[in-house]
């Protein structure tokens, strides 16, 4: 049987799209990455941004290769339906890469059995997955910057197998987003600044994966999210049929769970997430913001405990969350904490929280609030 026909059968079995391209460079991608980096739009993310010349020239990493087999594997499952109030993005709710890994392993195995060298590549800074998928015709590049396929829309994971087998190439898709731009106004932080251009500094998915304190101006927009953001995907019309096919009754990890679980209890739930240096403090930081955004007075007891945390990152974000919930009890928690000796960053968060609490949980002009507090402190 023709080798590509065998590979297509594997893809069909997983309802995946499959295509083939060569290892010629992607010069436009290298220019695009350099442009984003020069404008700071990559937001400090590395991945393919780290080495654009290598990522856009597959032959440099795979000099032995002749073809790249690209696949796009749908990942929605029951519980992933139309709800817009998820704490965890669908792709990260459980190990969604299993389907992709299986398809890629089966392709690698068929190629190997036929006597060919083959190497699985995905989420790897040696190859730009989306560029490969687009040139191989398994997806088009959406204005949201996601790869989109007919049928599954953006609800796909993409990956490749580089091989020395000489396979016929498939054509790029003629389909595109056309006049649709639904993802752009759907983004809660306006991170899609032009069609196909993402400002990763403002993208909630990227922000929740970063180290350090999260910018005040983004915290409210993060809403109840702890990891990932699906808003530009749920808005995408080509993905609607797939979304409606699955039940909406999913239940992801809650902020309360993240903040009450021990490290040992929490680690397995987040083992497939990108967490800087695997430090759970960053997951808890996200959960503190999510809990603050619930506005739920009954969360104040849990948050008050975190206000006294020895980690300034967590104490500061807990202070913010208390101020976001607001009200007399929230103000009392922050004022009591301010009576202690605190790191500057925590003190500033609590000062801002007292002001926000008085405004019913609205953070307005934080720099001016801090300036006034500093002036008052210096005057005493
Ligand atoms: S993932 Fe969320 S924040 Fe990022 S571009 Fe999409 S809608 Fe905007
Ligand atoms: S929402 Fe519309 S414009 Fe955005 S990626 Fe989907 S099809 Fe393209």
Image (cartoon, rainbow, N blue to C red):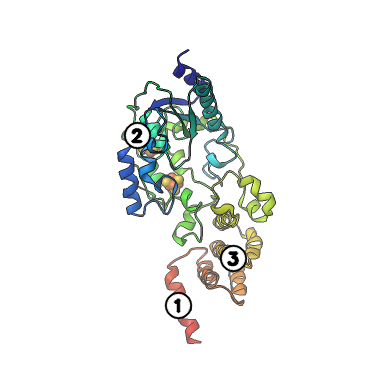
Horizontal arrangement in the rendering, residue 194 relative to residue 341 (left or right): left
* Residue at image coords 45%, 73%: 369
How crowded is the residue under tag 2: few (<14 C-alpha within 10 Å), some, or many (20+)?
some
- Number of numbered discs overlaid on the protein picture: 3
Q: Earlier in the sequence, mark 2 or mark 3?
A: 2
Q: Label 3 belongs to which residue?
A: 315
Query: Distance between the Cα atoms at labels 2 and 3?
Result: 44 Å
Query: Which label is found at residue 177?
Result: 2
In front here: 179 or 287? 287
Rounded to the nearest whole Å, what is the CA distance between mark 3 and mark 1?
A: 22 Å
Q: Position of residue 134 (x, y in %)?
A: 37, 32
Q: Is residue 195 visible?
A: no
Q: Which mark is residue 372?
A: 1
Disc 2: residue Cβ within 8 A of ligand 2's nearest atom: yes
Q: Residues within 10 Å of mark 3 (few under 14, many from 20)?
A: many
- Real-space Cα separation, disc 2 to disc 1, in angstroms: 49 Å
User: Which mark sits nearer the N-terminus, 2 or 1?
Assistant: 2
């Amino acid at each position: 049987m023709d080798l590509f026909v065998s590979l297509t059968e594997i893809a069909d079995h997983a309802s995946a799209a499959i295509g083939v391209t060569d290892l010629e460079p992607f010069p436009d991608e290298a220019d695009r990455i350099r442009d984003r980096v020069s404008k700071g739009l990559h937001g400090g993310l590395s991945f393919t941004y780290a080495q654009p010349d290598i990522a856009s020239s597959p032959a440099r990493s795979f000099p032995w290769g002749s073809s790249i087999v690209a696949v796009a594997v749908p990942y929605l499952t029951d519980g992933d339906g139309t709800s817009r109030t998820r704490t965890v993005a669908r792709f990260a709710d459980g190990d969604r890469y299993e389907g992709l890994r299986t398809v890629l392993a089966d392709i690698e195995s068929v190629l190997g059995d036929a006597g060919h060298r083959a190497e699985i590549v995905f989420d790897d800074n040696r190859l730009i997955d989306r560029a490969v998928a687009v040139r191989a015709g398994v997806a088009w590049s959406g204005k949201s910057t996601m790869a989109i396929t007919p049928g599954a829309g953006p609800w796909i994971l993409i990956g490749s197998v580089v091989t020395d087998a000489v396979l016929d190439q498939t054509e790029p898709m003629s389909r595109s987003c056309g006049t649709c731009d639904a993802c752009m106004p759907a983004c809660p932080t306006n991170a899609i600044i032009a069609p196909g251009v993402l400002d990763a500094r403002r993208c909630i998915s990227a922000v929740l994966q970063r180290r350090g304190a999260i910018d005040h101006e983004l915290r409210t927009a993060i809403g109840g999210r702890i990891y990932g953001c699906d808003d530009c995907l749920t808005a995408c019309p080509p993905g609607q049929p797939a979304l409606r096919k699955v039940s909406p009754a999913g239940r992801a990890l809650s902020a309360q769970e993240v903040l009450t679980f021990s490290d040992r209890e929490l680690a397995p739930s987040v083992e497939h997430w990108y967490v800087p240096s695997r430090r759970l403090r960053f997951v808890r930081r996200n959960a503190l913001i999510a809990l603050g955004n619930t506005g739920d007075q009954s969360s104040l007891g849990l948050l008050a405990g975190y206000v006294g945390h020895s980690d300034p990152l967590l104490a500061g974000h807990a202070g913010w969350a208390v101020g976001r919930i607001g009200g007399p009890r929230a103000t009392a928690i922050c004022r009591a904490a301010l009576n202690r000796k605190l790191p500057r960053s925590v003190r500033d968060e609590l000062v801002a929280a007292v002001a926000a609490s008085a405004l019913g949980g609205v953070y307005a002009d934080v720099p001016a609030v801090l300036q006034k507090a500093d002036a008052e402190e210096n005057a005493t």
